[in-house]
Image: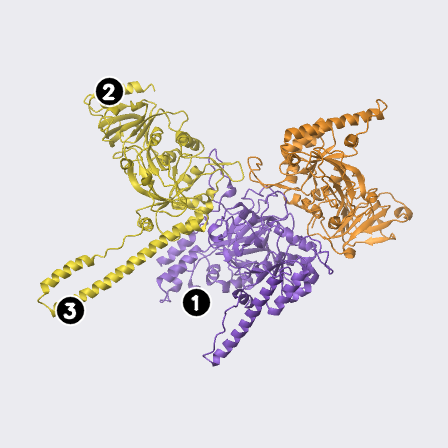
Amino acid sequence: MFSPFPLLAAALCATSAGPADLQPDGSSVVRAGKLITCADEGTQVVMDPVVVIADGKIHAIHAGADVEGVAWENVTDYGDRWLAPGFVDLHSHVGGSTRDINDMVFQVNSELRVAPVVIPNNDQLERPLAAGVTTILFIPGSGTNIGGQGVLMKLGEDLYEDALVRDPGSLKVAQGDNPTRWGYGMGRILMNYTLRFRLQRGRAYARAWDRFDAGEGPKPERDLALDIFRDLYANRAQISTHTQYYQLVLMTITMLARDFGLPTYIDHGSFDSYLATPEAQKYGVAAILGPREIMVPRPPRFDTDGRIEGTAWGFQEAGMAEVGFNTDAPVVPQEELSMQAAMGVRYGLRNDRGQGLRGLTIVPARTAGIAHRVGSLEVGKDADFIVTDGDPIDPRTAFDATWVNGSCVYCADRDGRSW
Amino acid sequence: MMLTTPLLLSVLPALSGAAAGPGLEPAASPTSTAIQADLFAIKARRVEIGNGEVMEHAVLLVEDGVIVTMGQDLPIERGIPVIELGEDQVVMPGIVNPYSRFGMDGSGYNDARPFVMASAELYPSEAYKTFLEFGMTTVGQYPAGQGVPGQAVALRPKGDTAEEMILEDGVYLKFVMRNSSSAKRNLSDGFKKADEFLKKVEEEREKFEKKNSKKSSSKKKDEKDDKKDEKEDEKKSSSKSSKDKDFVAPEPDERVKPFLDMRDGKLQALFSIDDAASYLHLIDAIGEEKFEWHLRVPLTRDIDVFHVKDQVGKVGCFVLMEPLITLMPGTMRQRNLPAEFDRAGAQLILLPRSDSKAGFQSFLEDVGVMIGAGLDRKAAVQAITHRPAAFLGLEEQLGSLQEGRRANLLVFNGDPFQPGTKLDAVMLDGQFVSGDMDQ
Amino acid sequence: MKQLQSIEGPGAPAGLAGRISFLGLASSVLLLGASAISLTGPALASYSPPTPAAFQDEEDDSEDAEEGKKEEEEDDKFLALVGGEIHTGLGGVLRNATLLAKNGKIHSFGYDVDVPEGAEVVDLGGMRVYPGLIAVSSSGLFGGGGDLANSVDPYSQNMTLALAAGITTAVNGNTVAKLKRGHVKGLVVKEDAFESLSYSNGNPQGQLKVNENFQRASEYLREYRAYEEEKRSNKDAKEPSRKGVDDKSVSILRGEIRPRFAANSRTDLMEIAELAQRFGFRPIVEGAREGWTIADHLGRAGVTAIVTPRTRRGKDERQVAEGGSSIENAAKLYQHGVPVVVVPASNGISLGGIVGQDLLHLPIEAGFAIRGGLPEQAALESITLEAARVLGVDYRIGSIEVGKDADLIVTDGDLLHYQTFVQWAIVDGEIVYDKQEEMFFAHIRPRPESALAPEKTVDAGEEGAIDPEGEEEDGDGDDDDEDEDEDEDSEDK
């Protein structure tokens, strides 16, 4: 049905070792028919995989053929099913709290954090978990120029500490139309001014702390509204930008990435945003696309010469090798994250290297700076994976189980099929 | 206007027989029908005939406002005044604009009023000078409104009374065809009413004939019974039968008559459609009905009417549209629909892009743009002269320059379709009515 | 009809295909089976229509009739889809087969189909043929208002896009109509698709009324049957009065029209099932969100369910029994004998940029039913044959069968795969959509050259004005000259 990867049945864990090393104490083993690693390099597909999980991490991945005869213990065997990394969504507003996570207090709210209000493993995440979503960046809405700080959390964990991947997950910046809702008569001029002013202060603040840390300056006064910039300039967090079409994406790239040197990614790439691909590549700005994935010709503003164009297709045509997908949940339901990739492929994204699935896994993980933990199935990474009966981005594919941090947190047989 | 002086020089001596007045001060003799002499000749280097052909070194002999002779390098009799045009000057038939409401200000209705005559609205207003100013020597004016607004009138835009202006009344019946049952009903109901009327007529005729035959039979009886009163009887019956024999059909209702006229070929229909679909609905509404009809297609930015151009082309009707580059829907790709329809076989008629002074002013230049974009030049000339004249049923009178046609002509200082070309003079029925040659 | 044997087309073997097609449907069945092989001559391209000579003996036949028949022959329009993988929609698959449509109907399909001369031939290069999809609910596809036949815009963008999605028939309001691009005539298949009824727990008064109506209608029908019985012996039998009897209810009980209920909750569904069983009719339930919890009841009651597999809604907190939406709804209903028809969440064409939830993605929605366990074949039928059945038009459309309307789609892969695009859509034997000829999707995985489009009559572009081929309609340019020549020849004889 779907086999974009070269069938290299080589084990990722190449070292020959004794039985104890093969399966440490307290570890568990998952077997299946096929495993897609989504790794940036090396093996892409492992046949008859044997995944050894210890302390919630992937201890080893063997191809079945390499470890014949080994007496595994604590085995979960999924037969001919596929294993793939759990999905990462970098744009969601479904925090599970009774109130929206979009407070819109000021025109720029860099001090606001959504972390305190996102409820881990809340009811609204039941279907997404069953749909293979394992990591979400919960961010404030786009009603102000800076909505606040998002939080990266896993699904399937009840405790905040267990669920937390990173706080701050990102600083949410919004440009263009949506923030004009904040105040009457607001336009681009005021928005640009206010945003730049905050960014300048943030940069000065971060530099002051850098000087202090290097013993070259006095200790700056703590400013909660600007603290986030220390994380940003240290690349411990990125700016996720609500920026949808060409002109806005250009503004995002030039203002945030070029002028202020901030780690930034497009988090709402839609319409003709792909026209900015050269600039995005020049300044290392990744593109996470969604919720809107096609552009319908509306000349003269959106002139596609009559084509209904896929945004992902456009980025790829313009030379960006990989793009990510998001849902902007609840705009697109959280559980339909994989549909976003399927639709990206439908509307023209070449999928010969599994670009669709990678756009749900390693691309967003890398973009958010958490690829050392999630986004691919490689030794040392979190054991977050899905069990499917086929191509993970095919809507027809049934998802049988989802594992997070080495535990099966959703099992269709046990819990009933939620999605 | 460097040509004016030599022109006048050549004309004036030639007007030897005439009084000096008429040529110079036409306003002085309001009753006179000719500004120039009743008989004069025009010598032109280049004449657009109107059918797309060009005659070089043409001589037109005009008498009483009508071209009586025309040919290449014809000798001109001594004593006939000659208007000798310059080398660069080009003559073209007067433009026929068959679809306008300029100068009319009435408003219409949305329902079917096929009896409304645009001529009823007509009065000689200053506005008509504008037509002449821009070379439109014949105009068709239609009644305002949606649905079936009524019948158009063909006129010459000059005259002191409406009657003087009217060339022909009831030249076409306008319909607004849309993708709706009500628009389609306007047509089908009209014919249905016509059918009902004819049925009624037929019934009455039958009734009449029955009555008549009864009478004649009873008359025979009378003959047998009483021969004495034969003569008297004969007188009576003959007088009676002459009255009764000719069945007089009742007059059709004013709503029915136009439809009967259409069937009889006395009236043609002009359907205004706004997209390809409305054409298909029109064809559906026409059904089996046979009558002469034509199309008005107001071009809009991304009209999709090209879908039916081949079908329209096969019909070969007149298609009235503006010289306007449109866009392929959903794109910025340009289409030259007038050219496409012309090529598909439709009889293209071009109208000013807007029914206003500005539209008239840029009309020829706009047509030139279409020619530049692929419209056949011959077709373009026809589309503003001969064809609209034929559409109005006036092609025997005007629309082209040849023997027997009205001397409605335009003199340009170059190619009429080139930007910057000036309209030097406008002649209507042998009189200069506008332009530099007026005086 | 033995005279037919004597006909010979000039310079060609007896045109058997021509005869068979002339003989009509009954004989066309022959082409399906192996018997066609023996009948078919080697010269497949030779097609000689019967001539008036065939009717020489039949003096009674007026010339007009002959004339009419001859004309019919001349006007025959054939469309041949060659080298495709035909998915009949009934479970059968024929690889590298040919499908021949004649005058808008499926004339024959299989491995030994004669393609008559003059037929429009499309080489599918292995692509798949499916029956056209049916949307049992739609809005905005026909571009017009309520009076569909008089207001349809058969060039509307939405109609083209719906065809691009594979939809060839859709319900607009309560009218079943075809997406006959370029035509305003002959698109209505059926005027009254359903009889909409409301029967909800939330409206006890309404429920009572519906019950009463059925009760009276049922009594009336019983009386009427008794009357008919009595009439045989007693001429003076009195016909029962229809006063106070609801006509709709009578029609429903007579099976002339099926009632459609919008119902989602378990309670409502249960009550509709009971109502249907009490009075003996087969209800259509639209929504059926909690149908999976009582699928067996619904199956027994003969319910057909129109579902949106991706429906999501938690259950009513006060409800003790299980409830809410389930991805397995369609599958469970199907398992219990409930025919399932799939509609997407939005019944229009949505171009705002968010994709996958509207009619443009009808097969994708059916795909979600597969995710929940519905067999692939049932998923295909949920947007084809089952949809035709629920509308009562399955005698004409919904599957590839000889004699049915040639409403077909050709795809570049598995219809239910997310990547698959419709390459051609055919309605009544006429190609009304060609992906490569339209602007919308031609750039997405362009069709390989090997699969050639039929010849198009395309106007050369204007100089300075682009005349894209994308919107050109296919001219009816198939040359029938040879046929006409033959006719002339035979007339001379």
Instruction: State the residue in front, A41 or C464.
Output: C464
Q: Amino acid at mark 2?
A: Leu
Q: How has the structure been colored for display?
A: by chain
Residue C87 point in image, percent of width and height: 60, 56
State the residue position of label 1. C2
Q: Is residue A40 visible?
A: no
State the residue position of label 3. B221
| Upstream in sequence: badge 3 or badge 2 | 2
Chain ID, purple in image: C
> Tag count in the figure?
3
Nearest to viewer (mark 1 / mark 2)? 2
* Disc 3 to disc 2, C-alpha distance: 85 Å
Q: Amino acid at mark 3?
A: Lys
Residue C114 point in image, percent of width and height: 51, 57
The chain that hosts pointer 3 is B
Chain ID, orange in image: A
Q: Residues within 10 Å of mark 1 (few under 14, many from 20)?
A: few
- Contact, CB < 8 Å: mark 1 with mark 3? no
Colour given to chain B in the rendered image: yellow
Tag 2, which secondary structure? helix
Tag 1, which secondary structure? helix
* Disc 1 to disc 2, C-alpha distance: 92 Å
